[in-house]
Amino acid sequence: MGARWEPIIRYDCSHGHSHVHKYDIMGREMKKMVNLNFENALTFSDWDIEKNCKDMFNSFTEVRDERI
């Protein structure tokens, strides 16, 4: 990790549905449906980030060997 900002998580309501993008340090992305209306998705995303920010950072920085 250098001096650049990198996204760890991004909640999104584009394409007509709510979903979350999670990233790892290698730049890989995992997309998951949230299945909430837009208002509840915003409320949930605020709560989730506040409650789990340390775990999200640890998950981001953990390098996984996908060959296993």
Image (spheres, rainbow, N blue to C red):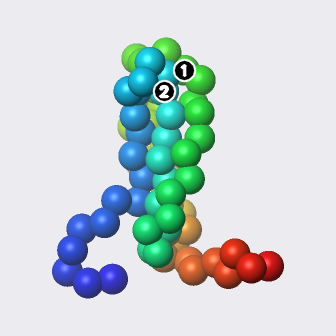
Q: Which residue is mark 2?
A: 18
**Vertical comparison of 21 with 38: above or below:** below
Horizontal and vertical percent position of residue 34: 57, 31
Residue located 40% across and 34% down the image: 12
Report helix, strand or loop for mark 1. loop
Horizontal and vertical percent position of residue 18: 48, 27
**Vertical comparison of 8 with 68: above or below:** above
Residue located 44% across and 68% down the image: 27
Q: Amino acid at mark 1?
A: Leu
Horizontal arrangement in the rendering, residue 12 relative to residue 56 (left or right): left
Q: Residues within 10 Å of mark 1 (few under 14, many from 20)?
A: some
Q: Which residue is mark 1?
A: 36
- Picture quarter with the C terminus: bottom right
Q: Amino acid at mark 2?
A: Ser
Quarter occupied by residue 3 = bottom left
Rounded to the nearest whole Å, what is the CA distance between mark 2 and mark 1?
Answer: 6 Å
Tell me, yes or no, whether the two marked residues, 2 and 1, touch with CB atoms within 8 Å. yes
What residue occupies the far left of the structure in this picture?
A: 3
Residue located 56% across and 77% down the image: 62
- Picture quarter with the N terminus: bottom left
Q: Residues within 10 Å of mark 2 (few under 14, many from 20)?
A: many
